[in-house]
Image (cartoon, helix red, strand yellow):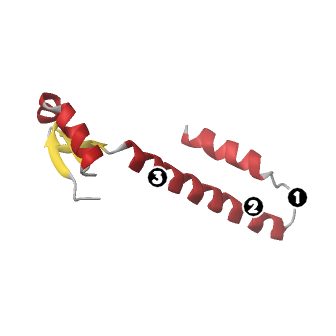
Amino acid sequence: MSDPVIESMADVRSHLADVIDRARREETPTIITRRGKQEAVVIDIQEYRRLREIAENAEEAWLNRLADEAESEGTEGSVSLEEMAALLRAEQG
């Protein structure tokens, strides 16, 4: 992946198709700013899916570690991995 291009919202609006093509063909993300503040990023869909998979795998590994730790400490007051995942997702909302 190339270093990101940083552009204002106004600039991106004027050539969105080019921004998408750059993300897809050149694997170059575009960071979009609004009033000088970074607000969003345009990336290729495959890169997005790859990043989502990494995040989901990391979350699953973390939940498994928590469950293993809880199991080693005893079962009183514990919840299942599925219940814990549901609670964490609800908190992230």
Q: Secondary structure at mark 2?
A: helix
Quadrant hosting residue 24? top left
Q: Residue at x 41, y 47 (%)?
A: 46
Q: Are marks 1 and 2 in contact (CB under 8 Å)?
A: no
The image position of residue 71, as x and y in percent, is 82, 65
- Would you place residue 93 above or below residue 88 in this image? above
Q: Work out whether 1 lies above or below 19.
A: below
Q: Position of residue 27 (x, y in %)?
A: 28, 52
Q: Is residue 88 left or right of residue 30?
A: right
Residue 54 lies, in percent from the top left, at 51, 56
Which of the two discs, 3 and 2, labels the residue nearer the N terminus?
A: 3
Of residues 83 and 29, which is closer to you in this image? Answer: 29
For marks 3 and 1 on the same chain, the one whose residue lies earlier in the sequence: 3
Q: How many marks?
A: 3
**Among all residues in the image, which is located at the extreme front?**
25
Packing grade of label 1 (10 A; few <14, some 14-19, many >=20) is few
Q: Nearer the viewer, mark 1 or mark 2?
A: 2
Residue at mark 3? 50
Residue displayed at 17% across by 37% down? 18
Q: Label 3 sits on what residue type?
A: Arg
**What secondary structure is found at the residue carrying circle 1?**
loop
| Residue at image point 55% right, 42% down | 92
Q: CA distance from mark 3 to mark 1?
A: 38 Å
The residue at which mark 1 appears reads as: 76
Alpha carbon separation for disc pair 3 and 2: 26 Å
The mark that comes first in sequence, 1 or 2, is 2
Q: Is residue 81 above or below residue 18?
A: below
